[in-house]
Image (tube, helix red, strand yellow):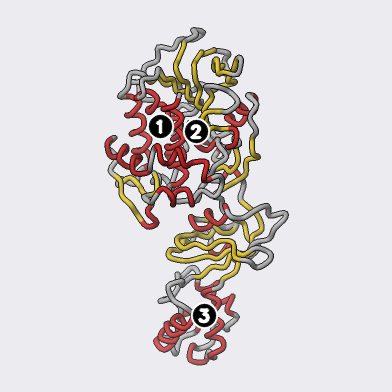
């Protein structure tokens, strides 16, 4: 931890703070900075030895800070209780998030899909910026390696926080920003659910969201670590109804499918014990079947005297070709000039309709975020304060809200944290 943080809190001493924030992730650091700027004597408690552990690995270490879209589009990208976030998103907007990080020395850039990243492509720069925001304000104190055991209320109002070593800290308000249960190695262990439940709140059962998918087709093992760009997927349920489509990046793993568009698709899928899903992958969405057929005919003319297995190098990634050849059921050793029109048409259809049968979600520990959490109807959406306990606030992933990939979940964390902080 940066040593410039003051540590005047001594063992077995009871202090009084205006607000205590539990959890030093994206939401917790944002809340601490905003509360201190609002003049509140603020204490941030983090059970890890450093702040922002999960934030440091977000976006494969690049950190997709937010999405540079309209507010209504932000809400549309939150499939779980999106309307609950109206006040949060309009109080602390994505434009304000970008401006804040720019002011803190993090230059940003907008990429495909309006995703906003640091120009440095380093998530640690985002963490350090939030630390600088807190460092610059004398109203903030931070205690690391400090696990909270209980939040105690009296007469329907928050009274104090009790640490696992039995130390007690009195306060007027508490902001719970403990995250969910995904990526437990970063400290996300569901503590916030326990605190909320003990104070009378309903917890919507947590489940994985934005997660990789295991599929039935065993040939995916041959494609492991292959990444694809500019591809599209359609997701169908057991009634063959399309429930989702997307365009972008994905990757194969030894167990199935992963990557941004797959993770987003997982949000739209339900209980796999009650419903079956299939994912249809289009490798060439920019070309309809007629245009793709003409493209393949040109390649076949170019490689007319080669074996079929050696004719697709201009069209497909090298690692993918043996699988496509196998699935096409065309003899890999047949000369290209001997392939029939029907076989070529079937190849075209295959390239635009590779079908995978979903078997399972990957373990919740691998999920980017957790779906579920504190029931939104028990939280005042205008302030993030509990409707059951005065002075108790919630921010970020601990609440039953979750979004697709693209920076939307960090925007939720920042907006809800800010809203909670200014209302304490």
Do callouts 2 and 3 mark residues in contact (Cβ within 8 Å)? Answer: no
Q: Quadrant of residue 257?
A: bottom right
Do callouts 2 and 1 mark residues in contact (Cβ within 8 Å)? Answer: yes
| SS type, badge 1 | helix
Q: Which residue is mark 3?
A: 348
- Identify the residue shown where x is 40% and y is 12%: 8
User: Seen in the image, is 166 located left or right of residue 3?
Assistant: right
Answer few, some or many: residues within 10 Å of disc 3's Cα (few below 14, many 20 plus, some between 14 and 19).
many
Q: Nearer the viewer, mark 1 or mark 3?
A: 1
Residue 414, how many percent across, how many down? Answer: 42, 37
Q: Quadrant of residue 305?
A: bottom left
Answer few, some or many: residues within 10 Å of disc 1's Cα (few below 14, many 20 plus, some between 14 and 19).
many
Does residue 176 show up?
no
- Residue 142's label in the rendered image is none
Q: Which residue is mark 2?
A: 395
Q: Which residue is mark 1?
A: 30
| SS type, badge 3 | helix
């Amino acid at each position: 931890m940066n040593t410039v943080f003051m540590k005047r809190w001594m063992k077995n001493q009871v202090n009084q703070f205006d607000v205590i924030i539990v959890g030093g992730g994206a939401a917790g650091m944002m809340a601490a900075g905003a509360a201190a700027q609002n003049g509140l004597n603020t204490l941030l408690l983090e059970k890890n030895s450093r702040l922002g552990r999960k934030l440091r690995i977000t976006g494969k270490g690049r950190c997709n800070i937010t999405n540079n879209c309209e507010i209504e589009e932000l809400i549309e990208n939150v499939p779980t209780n999106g309307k609950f976030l109206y006040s949060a998103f309009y109080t602390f907007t994505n434009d304000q998030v970008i401006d804040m990080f720019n002011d803190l020395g993090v230059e940003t850039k907008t990429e495909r899909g309006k995703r906003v990243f640091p120009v440095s492509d380093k998530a640690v720069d985002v963490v350090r910026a939030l630390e600088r925001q807190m460092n610059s304000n004398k109203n903030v104190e931070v205690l690391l390696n400090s696990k909270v055991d209980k939040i105690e209320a009296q007469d329907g109002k928050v009274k104090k926080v009790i640490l696992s070593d039995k130390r007690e800290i009195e306060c007027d308000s508490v902001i719970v920003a403990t995250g969910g249960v995904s990526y437990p190695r970063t400290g996300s262990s569901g503590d916030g659910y326990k605190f909320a439940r003990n104070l009378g709140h309903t917890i919507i059962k947590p489940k994985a969201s934005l997660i990789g998918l295991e599929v039935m087709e065993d040939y995916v093992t041959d494609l492991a670590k292959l990444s694809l760009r500019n591809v599209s997927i359609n997701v169908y349920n057991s009634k063959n109804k399309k429930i989702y489509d997307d365009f972008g990046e994905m990757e194969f793993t030894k167990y199935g499918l992963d990557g941004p568009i797959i993770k987003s698709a997982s949000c739209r899928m339900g209980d796999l014990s009650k419903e079956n899903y299939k994912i249809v992958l289009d490798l060439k969405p920019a070309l309809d079947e007629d245009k793709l057929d003409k493209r393949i005919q040109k390649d076949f003319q170019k490689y007319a005297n080669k074996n079929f297995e050696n004719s697709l190098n201009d069209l497909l990634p090298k690692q993918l070709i043996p699988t496509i050849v196998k699935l096409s059921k065309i003899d890999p050793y047949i000369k290209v000039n001997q392939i029939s029109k029907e076989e070529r048409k079937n190849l075209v259809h295959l390239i635009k309709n590779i079908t995978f049968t979903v078997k399972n979600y990957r373990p919740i520990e691998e999920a980017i975020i957790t779906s579920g959490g504190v029931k939104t109807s028990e939280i005042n959406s205008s302030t993030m304060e509990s409707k059951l306990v005065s002075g108790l606030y919630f921010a970020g992933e601990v609440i039953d809200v979750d979004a697709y990939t693209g920076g939307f979940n960090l925007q939720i964390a920042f907006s809800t944290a800010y809203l909670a902080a200014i209302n304490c």
